[in-house]
Image (cartoon, coloured by chain):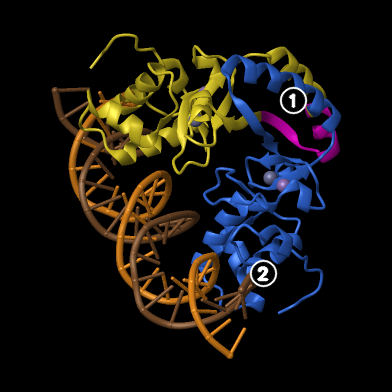
Chain colours: A yellow, B blue, C brown, D orange
Amino acid sequence: MRRHGQRHWGGEFKGCGYRMTKPRQAILDVLGETDEHLSAEDIYQAVYKFYPNIGMTTVYRNLELLVDMSLIVRFDFGHGRAKYELTDQYSEKGHHHHLVCKKCNKVIDYSDFMNDEVKFLKSTEKGLSEIYKFRITDHLIQFLGICEECSKK
Amino acid sequence: MRRHGQRHWGGEFKGCGYRMTKPRQAILDVLGETDEHLSAEDIYQAVYKFYPNIGMTTVYRNLELLVDMSLIVRFDFGHGRAKYELTDQYSEKGHHHHLVCKKCNKVIDYSDFMNDEVKFLKSTEKGLSEIYKFRITDHLIQFLGICEECSKK
DNA sequence: GTTGGTAATGGGAATCACTACCAATAAGGG
DNA sequence: CCCTTATTGGTAGTGATTCCCATTACCAAC
Ligand SMILES: [Mn+2]
Ligand SMILES: [Mn+2]
Ligand SMILES: [Zn+2]
Ligand SMILES: [Zn+2]
């Protein structure tokens, strides 16, 4: 069951009443070994290969838990199924946002121009939280359009 | 069937093979008379009050059409059902973005600090489209956090 | 090592938003 | 008014996600 490249998440589960289990380790492994944005079904399929006892219910339940624990993030790109990624701090990608193709639904990660972004966010978040008494904890920035391949057709 | 405040959309349907029908007018009316972000079900309920023949299927079908025609916009906030709004140019709100409360799922419109946004978008979009050969047509910006009421509990 | 309590699992049924299908209806140009 | 064709609305799916519940894994205390 122990495989290559797998990370130790014990610390994150200590003291909060949760246990590190095989399914949880497996789900985190799968998410840690890909660059893609995986759906619950994708994750189920991938985990199934080395842990065929896994149940779909367990995948969904644990995805929810891991989101609550902020180990992973859930995205609703509006393509029918939710997608999941490791949180910035646990991912090699680090803080990034998405380009989403309206035609083929491809999602491209980018982390360019973060300086401009930080400048923009700093002033905007401050202003908004004062005006609307809203405690901002997170932001979602994405650009929609047509990807390179799709623009050729 | 003709009611107050209703707008003439004839022009938008001319010449493209589409017809202006009662359900379409009704859906646009409902969206034109609210400040909220309505789901298909919300719209069905609202239309039902003055046009009880309306069918859920027709609502879904026309929402899709109206999105294609760019008269309305669809948002997937990840709360289970999609929400719809008039497009910026047809809405009193104009161009705006959203604050989304993680606790109560409330969505607040804002259009403050658009100068900062424009500055940020201009440089970022230009850079991204060059690097990724991606033709950007639209953007999605939203801030997540805890709204005023929810922070009191 | 055994026990007891709680966390976690996984299979199947149930939900819920949304779609496909199709016969019946109604725009709207001529 | 007529005809063509877009559109409607009911019913029966679909597909993703959640609920329920009996069984199992884990862990700390005897
Ligand atoms: Mn990503
Ligand atoms: Mn809005
Ligand atoms: Zn594409
Ligand atoms: Zn709230």
Amino acid, disc 2: Ala
> Residue at left 74%, top 25%?
B121
Residue A6 sits in quarter: top left
Quadrant of the rendered image holding ligand 4? top right
Residue B17: image location, x then y, percent:
59, 61
Residue D30: image location, x then y, percent:
27, 28
Residue range corresponding to the magenta coloring: A125-138
The answer to whether residue A130 is magenta is: yes
Q: Mark 2 sits on what residue? A: B26
Most foreground residue, B128 or B12: B12
Density class for disc 1 (Cα within 10 Å; few <14, some 14-19, many ≥20) is some
Residue B67: image location, x then y, percent:
61, 51
Cα distance between the residues tagged 2 and 1? 35 Å
Q: Mark 1 sits on what residue? A: B121
N-terminal of the pair, mark 2 or mark 1, is 2
The answer to whether residue B53 is magenta is: no
Amino acid, disc 1: Leu
| Residue A71 shows in the view | no
Residue C1 sits in quarter: top left
Q: Is residue D1 above or below residue B42?
A: below
Callout 2: SS: helix
Quadrant housing the C terminus of chain B = top right
Q: Is residue B27 above or below residue A111?
A: below
> Residue at left 70%, top 20%?
B126
> Residue at left 82%, top 52%?
B92
